[in-house]
Amino acid sequence: MTPRAAVIIPAAGFGTRMNLDHPKQYHLLAGIPILVRTVRAFCDEDYIARIVVVVPSDMVQHTRSLLFDHGFDETKLTIVAGGRRRQDSVRAGLDALDDSTEIVLVHDGARPLITRQLIVRCYEAALVSGAAIAAVPVKDTLKKDNTLGQVAKTINRISLWQAQTPQAARRDLLEKAYRINGDADVTDESSLLEKAAIPVTLVEGAETNIKITRPEDLFLAEKLLSNNAAPIFRIGHGYDAHRFTENRKLVLGGVTIPHSHGLAGHSDADVLTHALCDALLGATGNGDIGKHFPDSDAQFLDVYSISLLKRVIQLVRNNGFMIVNADITLICQAPRLAPFLPQMKEKLGQACRVVTDVFNIKATTTEGMGFTGRQEGIGCHAVVLLQK
């Protein structure tokens, strides 16, 4: 059997050099949080049975929601609080592993461009030699300065390597290194292993396996992503209509609108939200709202349609897509809807976990023509653009 491995992703720092008002690992890289991209790189490896993400103590719940909202397998993922130093965070990750783990990989949360090939090479090197580190040969001339900020000497770069991650080791070796030198201040796991006289094999890494430390690194990472693969776009269209009825609330886009009549339907008959759901399902090739929430099912009787939208968004995310924008047109002779459109955008943004500017909502009449013009009901069209 393939030895079971776990990956520990330390992401408990703040990243002050990025000049952000939030930890850099939660910052968006080409529309997706850096940490999400990093975790995703390890999800499809069968030999990795556990992924432990180590974050600031006050971000544990937020991280859990963020990762699970992006469709990660809850049975494979553990989120724990980190410590003051990187080695404290990795130690917390080690403590979260069960006894079946034989190989431990450690990978920086801020290295989102890691490739499957490099992960496999580090894992296999640890199997053979006990411990391994991804690194790239130093290619620039190195200078040592003096106390005056002047060049004191040139360092011979032959045999010098720049450390990266993953860093991999047999679990028993890494735990031995912690027992011997766990209190020493070190910058990576390889340093701990070295101090314990445990040999570490060099595995050639990749220049693209950059760690996002400064704002210019983010720009470079976006360029690398755009060069590696063209984005995939999908367009979806949705339409829904419901007739007016008495003794019901009128709910549009999750907002209750004062009016003499509501809309008839099995759910709350929110035509706007239904049209948006159909557009999202259409763009991802997942049928329509009736397939997922049939009116023959009692659990959807009078259901608040925003809750259905949240489930559809989860499906969209599970398919690897994000909303670029959505354009929605309500067709309604009465009541007047313009004052309520900003509230609708807020509701949709909250449900879809995106900024409200993603949505454009318009309301129009048909100048008295057709079923909407005769005030028999309300119709709605929605068009969405998704990107993977």
Image (spheres, helix red, strand yellow):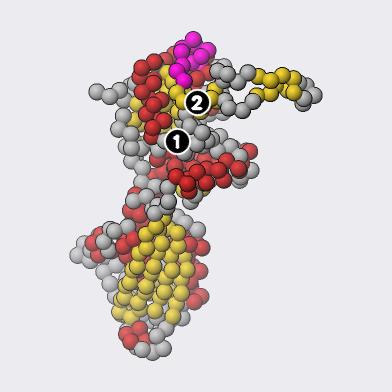
Residue 71 % position (x, y) = 36, 46
* Position in image of residue 264 (x %, y %): 29, 75
Left of 321 or right of it: where is 194? right
Q: Residue drawn 31% across and 75% down?
A: 241
Q: Residue at x 30, y 23 (%)?
A: 3
Picture disc at residue 135? 2
Q: CA distance from mark 1 to mark 2?
A: 12 Å
Q: Is residue 229 magenta?
A: no
Quadrant of the rendering where the N terminus is positioned:
top left
Tell me where the magenta segment starts and ends, as one range: 192-202
**Type of the residue with mark 2:** Ala
- Indicate the amino acid at tag 1: Ile
Q: Are marks 1 and 2 in contact (CB under 8 Å)?
A: no
Please tell me which of labels 1 and 2 falls first in the chain.
1
Q: Relative to the observer, which residue lies in front, 232 or 1?
A: 232
Q: Few, some or many C-alpha atoms within 10 Å of disc 1 (few <14, some 14-19, many ≥20)?
A: many
